[in-house]
Amino acid sequence: MVNSSLVLDLVEAVVTVADGATVTVRLGAGEQGQLMQTVAAWCARSGNELLEVRDGSATIRRGHTPDPLAGLDPGQLPGTRLWMYTNFDCNLACDYCCARSSPQTARRALGIDRVRRLAGEAVQAGVSELLLTGGEPFLLPDLDDLVEACTAELPTTLLTNGMLFRGHRLERLRRMDRDRLALQISLDSATPDAHDSHRGTGSWARAVAGIRIAQDEGFRVRVAATLPAGQTHELQPFHSFLDSLGIAPADQVIRALAHRGYADTGLELTIESLIPEVTVTADGVYWHPVSADDTDQLITAEIFPLAQAIAEVRRRFSEYRARADAAAKWFPCA
């Protein structure tokens, strides 16, 4: 039997608070089990959320907590893409490298055993794409094996500076699956000056040559540029140059310079401001590939099981989004 007095108390209490706020209502006299059922039924019908019943009182949130993941594009859902840092050493020493890579950087290789296990667990965890990055992956003598372990499970993108496609490294490239692998090559400008000023003299010409080699070998090629905010006026000439190379518009990637790693300036990117892209290195699981060398975005040192690490990233992201939404309701911008 519905306790009309309790229902009235619930209505009167909830209408006094803002959406998302909580209120506590005394259940009053009566059989506690029936009173709890009344509260639960009223919350279900009225679109409010019963949080707990304790010591003769019910705590209720007005409305339901929105799902922080519901508003994301499907491709942005944490865990949809899995990044793996195959290594941290590089043939270049770019002055804004977020991973602090250089020829002197320790390799910190992820290794074939972990890559193979990650690729296998990624399928079960709902990952739809794998991305391999560094450092420069083509420095690894077993790169073709790493790539094969990934492409056997999921479509894969391999990030590279494109400068090492010759000799035995070119042979490794040729052994990779063209149907399941895309190459993403770094190129920052339509002419050598800007690119070479950050990545080293002659690197632009070798990167462009690498793009052409990869295309000739039958690979899908994406080109990614890292640009400071002050260089956005150069986008149209850059896009025109990539068009002339035969790079599809959808494969022309522009990344904002982040104030991470070796960079002296750039966007300040924190866990609270970044939509996470789960990233695995030899040291653990990180929030995002741009911060995979920074302990402030280390989620856990335990790589396996992968599904558990992804769940933890989603939990923290939901927590941060809920906190931000609550703050926006109580402290809206003027």
Image: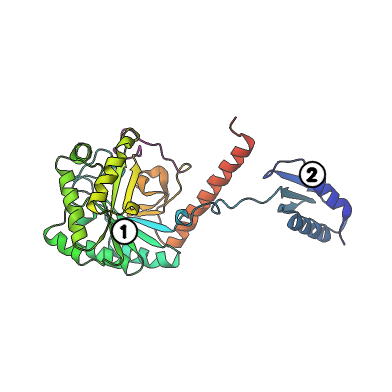
Q: Residue at x 13, y 61 (%)?
A: 168
Relative depth, front residue between 30 and 152: 152
- What kind of element bears circle 1? strand
Question: Of discs 1 and 2, which sits in the foreground?
Answer: 1
- Relative placement, left or right, of 80 versus 185 is right
Which quadrant of the rendered structure holds the C terminus? Answer: top right
Question: Which image quadrant is residue 256 in?
Answer: top left
- Counting from the top left corner in percent of width and height, residue 217 is at 19, 63
Would residue 134 appear left or right of 77 to someone viewing this image?
left
Q: Quadrant of residue 240?
A: top left
Query: Vertical placement of 261 versus 109: above or below?
Result: above
Residue found farthest to the bottom: 152
**Residue labelled with disc 2:** 13
- The reply to whether residue 80 is visible in this rendering is yes
Give 254 or 82, whichever is nearer the viewer: 254
Q: Residue tagged by mark 1?
A: 157
Going by the picture, which residue comes out furthest to the left?
Answer: 167
Q: 264 above or below 9?
A: above
Residue at (64% x, 36% y) in the render? 330
Between the residue at mark 1 and the residue at mark 2, the CA separation in whole angstroms equals 54 Å
Residue type at the position of mark 2: Ala
The magenta region covers 258-271
